[in-house]
Amino acid sequence: MVELYLIDIIRDHLNFIKVNMTLSSMQHNVDLTQYNTMGFTAHAVNYLAIDADDDLAAFFQNNDLQQAHMDCFVLGGGSNLVLTRDVTGAVLHMRQRGIRIMDESSSHIRVAVAAGEVWHHWVMHCIERGWLGLENLALIPGSVGACPVQNIGAYGVEVKDTIDHVKAWDRAQHVWVHLSNAECGFAYRDSVFKKEWLIVSGQPQSRYIITEVVFKLLKDASQWRPKMAYGDVAAMATSLAGSESIQAKHVAQAIIAIRQSKLPDPAVLGNAGSFFKNPIVSVQQLERLKASFPTIPNYPQADASVKIAAGWLVEQAGYKGMRDGAVGVYEKQALVLVHHGGGQGRDLMALAQRISDGVFAKFAVRISPEPIVY
């Protein structure tokens, strides 16, 4: 009993040290310009770098922080974010690193990836090792921890098809949880992480903070089939493969080349990638649209609905390449809104509303932003 008592004392003392180290690591009035790819200037009233899971747990175990900073904003790579004002409360910047194999068989492998890992680096890591399933998602900006939130997708693939489970801190129960693929509630650009909310300081905030994503990927190349139905992927991948059979690396290389030809580098021109979600319509609505616009790009879905290309709608409405002061629409891709410098997030959102209204006036279809707006 004495030994157990001493262990408890030591554990409590270590927790006390961790909590107070977390408090001392808090920074104030931090410029977030470099932490969002749109390049909008905003400041974090309080900022805490989360380099390990213990940092996050310690933050929520600190009574002073609980009262003062439960109003939290979770920041990853900042590539799917529009800042329209300073961030109150505490910005928790997820910077954990690490990739570890959990288990594998002759056909599949499960790999745990820390939330702070760069998404594209992780995809290329998989391709180099022959782990299959993520090649269509190459060059998507952002961090691994953000991928389940938005259920990122591109060129006919969604990340939900490769996720085994997600590790997260449950802010409601103050415990670590492992959410299975089914529990993540994945849908088109949606998940439970965008639906389960806490009301803090009168504002809704996500209940879960993701710290690790576990992927289940294919190892057996004989079971792999390339997904190349979208755009010019098939033609470019075939060209890259030459006399070889098409491999995952060829698909990834093709998609990287296509994305680079259409999308601006955030380091050169501020952007958040694809800004509008592709709207989902019924077959009947599509038929009405095709009567007036027979070439409208559309993609039938498994649930009998139809996805329409938002970029095509924006371009046909006349907004491609337009500029309104410091913000505008990219000249090579109407789906991308850009920041030329010196503007503010609210300028971009005013333009986004104008575009949405213009598309609705022409097509009677509403498009909505994909990024998180603060």
Image (spheres, grey):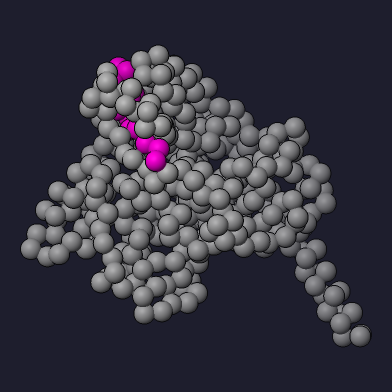
Range covered by the magenta-colored residues: 304-322
Q: Residue at x 27, y 32 (%)?
A: 297
Instruction: Return the residue found at the far right.
Output: 2
Residues 280 and 337: in front is 280
Residues 78 and 287: in front is 287
Instruction: Return the residue found at the far front.
Output: 284
Q: Is residue 97 visible?
A: no
Compared to residue 97, the image places residue 326 above or below, namely above
Q: Quadrant of the C terminus?
A: top right
Compared to residue 120, the image places residue 299 above or below, namely above
Judge whether residue 315 is colored magenta. yes
Position in image of residue 264 (x %, y %): 31, 36
- Residue 27 is left or right of residue 360, and the answer is right
Q: Quadrant of residue 54?
A: bottom right
Position in image of residue 72 (x %, y %): 68, 43
Compared to residue 135, the image places residue 150 above or below, namely above
Judge whether residue 321 is colored magenta. yes
Q: Residue at x 85, y 75 (%)?
A: 8
- Residue 26 is left or right of residue 79, and the answer is right
- Residue 313 is left or right of residue 233, and the answer is right
